[in-house]
Structures are given as C-alpha cells and as structure tokens.
Amino acid sequence: MALANKLGITDAAELARAEEKISKAKALELFETGLLDTFAVGTFAGLAAIHKHLFGALYDFAGKMRTVNIAKGNFRFAPLIYLEAALNNIDAMTQSSFDKIIEKYVEMNIAHPFREGNGRSTRIWLDMILKKELKQVIDWSTVDKEDYLLAMERSPIKDIEIKILLKNALTDKINDREVYMKGIDASYHYEGYSVYKTGELKKGQ
C-alpha cells in the first residue's frame, strides 16, 4: 500500500518514484535559493523545516512529528510516547566536535521523527551542522551505501563504525552542489517501515 498523499497515487512503486523526483527538485531549490541557510541548525525545528520543504507537495504530514510508532525489521524507532522528549534532548546535545555531531545524528536517526523521508532530511540536517561547526560536509559519493546502512543499523549500540565511515568522507567542498545533492539519494534511506501499536508489530505497509 502507498502512503496517503496529495497526488492521489495508490501504487507504492509509483509513489516512490514521484517522491524521489519531487524531493530532489525541492532539495536543489533549498540549496540554490539559499533558503536552507535560513533554517535553524542542529534542532528539530530546523529539521522539520527541511522535511516540510522536501515533502510538502506530497504529504500532509510533511514537517510534522509522526503520530504512529514505526519499526524497521526488528528495530523500533523511538516510541511515540517518548518522541517529543527525545527531540528536546537532541536539541540540547552539544555539537562542538565531529564525534558529538555524529552522536547527535545517531540520536536523531533513533528518533526518526517523521512518518517518511527521515533519512534524506536528516542527512541535509547533518551537513548543515558540519558546515556551521567544522566548515566541512560529507561527500556522500564516497560513502558506500551498504556500509552506511549497516553502520547506521548498528549505531544505537556502537557508533564507532558510522563515525569512521563519515569522517573518512569529510570534504571542505561546502558549497558544491553535486556533493550536497548526493545526500538526497533515495538509495541511502530505510525502506519498508512497519507500523505497530502497543505490543506486537503489524505487517509492513
């Protein structure tokens, strides 16, 4: 099943294609107009502004905290009951060094605050923090997608892998459009979320 959307698309594959096309166009717009530089850096409010811009043409929930519990495989992202508190804690986390920034990124990934589009929005959010604090960003074209997804899956328990992987991909090309756009690549994001209520997981939708 496809998520309810403003385009009335009911086929999941068709929606994924439309989502990728529209989100990439919106991401480029953020970069080229300078609008991205007006968003708060390192906060949920800033992330929500990114998400709303990328996905506002598709989803009513764009830029809004999810209202369901979600999981990927056997991993459950932050339960809805604790989500707001988790986001407040992330806002308060320091971002004074590379390690601290990645720890903040890992926590935002665990929170997974949106129903869809978390990965793409959060990678832009991460680059905004790195750009502000370190005058560097991630060159996503040098990051192996499988290694990245595996490292992110393991990061709640051990974040050393994702730190090494992303540190090796740092670049000072902070104003390079191609470097920026690679982060929006849909192939880096989690797919197949399932929704669950108290207790058991539901089948993926």
Image (cartoon, helix red, strand yellow):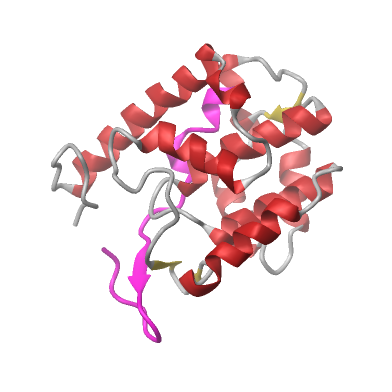
Q: Quadrant of residue 154?
A: bottom right
Where is residue 159 shown, x and y percent of the image? 74, 59
Where is residue 118 shown, x and y percent of the image? 48, 48
Which part of the image, by quadrant, shows the N terminus? bottom left
Q: Quadrant of residue 9?
A: top left
In the image, residue 14 sits, relative to residue 147, either above or below, namely above
**Residue 191 included in the magenta stretch of the image:** yes
In the image shown, does 200 or 83 lie closer to the viewer?
Answer: 83
Q: Is residue 35 left or right of residue 106?
A: left
Res 170 visible: no
**Residue 12 included in the magenta stretch of the image:** no
The count of marks equals 0
In the image shown, does 186 or 136 lie closer to the viewer?
Answer: 136
Q: Quadrant of residue 151?
A: bottom right
Res 190 visible: yes
Question: Where does the magenta region start and end?
Answer: 180-205
